[in-house]
Amino acid sequence: MQTRPLGNSPLSIAPLAFGGNVFGWSVDEKRSFELLDAFVDAGGNLIDTADVYSAWVPGNRGGESETIIGKWLRRSGKREQVVISTKVAKWVEQPGLSPTNIRQALDGSLKRLQVDCIDLYQAHEDDASVPLAETLGEFGRLIEAGKIRVIGASNYSAARLADALAVSKQHGLPRYESVQPEYNLVSRTGYEKELEPLIRRENLGVISYYALASGFLTGKYRSEADLARSSARGGAVKKYLNPQGRQVLAALDSVAAAHRASPAQVALAWLMARPGITAPIASATSVAQLHELLGATSLQLSHNEIAQLDLASD
């Protein structure tokens, strides 16, 4: 699986990232280990998580995903084969991007992950209450200390990302080398109109989330009855069940049939073909599902097929 550079950083990323939000939520520790082994054995390398995962689950408090990944790293001996990405700012126990919180949160993540250094450490969301120079300055000190290799930004507006890049340049501080936005065939406007021009101009990496629109782009949810069968996904997917969403599914079905592929594979391949996208994030709860998603990395869409999908989702 051919890797892609992440911005101007030394990191090189395989074209599909594994979303660790499922660890400690919809998959237990044993299944998590199986999924991680299968992902790496197939050539994947970026594992995306956050300190807050999965605090939303009754009985959890946060840190569960990192803890499971840490146990797997220790057991598997595969630390050198993976790029570990985690995040700070959204966990209610350690919120925001103040220097003190970043430092304390990072130490907690390092301990749970059982590593000495985080490959990609991301601001999970913007924190306008803290000057950008203070946040980036602390990231810089942690890079110098060898606890972080590269930093990234998630859920930043184009304006704030531009401000952060300007502050980095002005003060000689590390810059955000990657961005993690929501982006998929049914959620295009926010990324393409504002973030994409800045990202491509500044040569930033893009690790997009909700690549399959909470499962809608798999084609499993085509009616209200389908939504009712999934209490976990139904609410998130309902907003896509409209004329445009059905048009996108029809285009996915058409392209998928031509390749003997699944709609999910086509939706991911469309993302991978987008200039500037380093790797979309996808999650799986079974090894079979994971292998299906990984099949997208070898799916080459024609210019006409990409145009067909663009038109359906425009």
Image (tube, grey):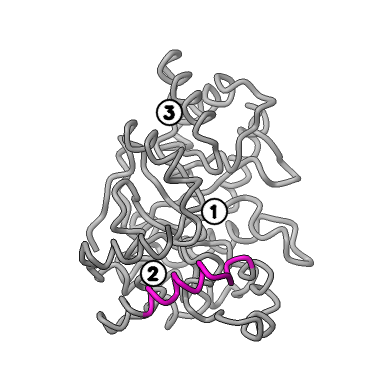
First in sequence: mark 3 vs mark 1? 1
Q: Nearer the viewer, mark 2 or mark 1?
A: 2
Report the disc number at residue 311.
Answer: none
Q: Residues within 10 Å of mark 2 (few under 14, many from 20)?
A: many
| Dot 2 amino acid type | Phe
| Dot 3 amino acid type | Arg
> Which stretch is magenta?
239-253
Residue 93: where, in percent of width, then height?
Answer: 75, 45
Q: Is residue 303 magenta?
A: no
| Dot 1 amino acid type | Leu
Is residue 93 shown above or below 217?
above
Residue at position x 53%, y 58% in the image: 70
Is residue 117 shown above or below 167?
below
First in sequence: mark 2 vs mark 1? 2
Residue 116: where, in percent of width, then height?
Answer: 48, 44
Q: Residues within 10 Å of mark 3 (few under 14, many from 20)?
A: many
Report the disc number at residue 113.
Answer: 1
Q: How much space separates mark 3 and mark 1, taking CA atoms? A: 24 Å
Q: How much space separates mark 2 and mark 1, taking CA atoms? A: 18 Å
**Residue at numbered disc 3:** 175
Residue 225: where, in percent of width, then height?
Answer: 65, 86
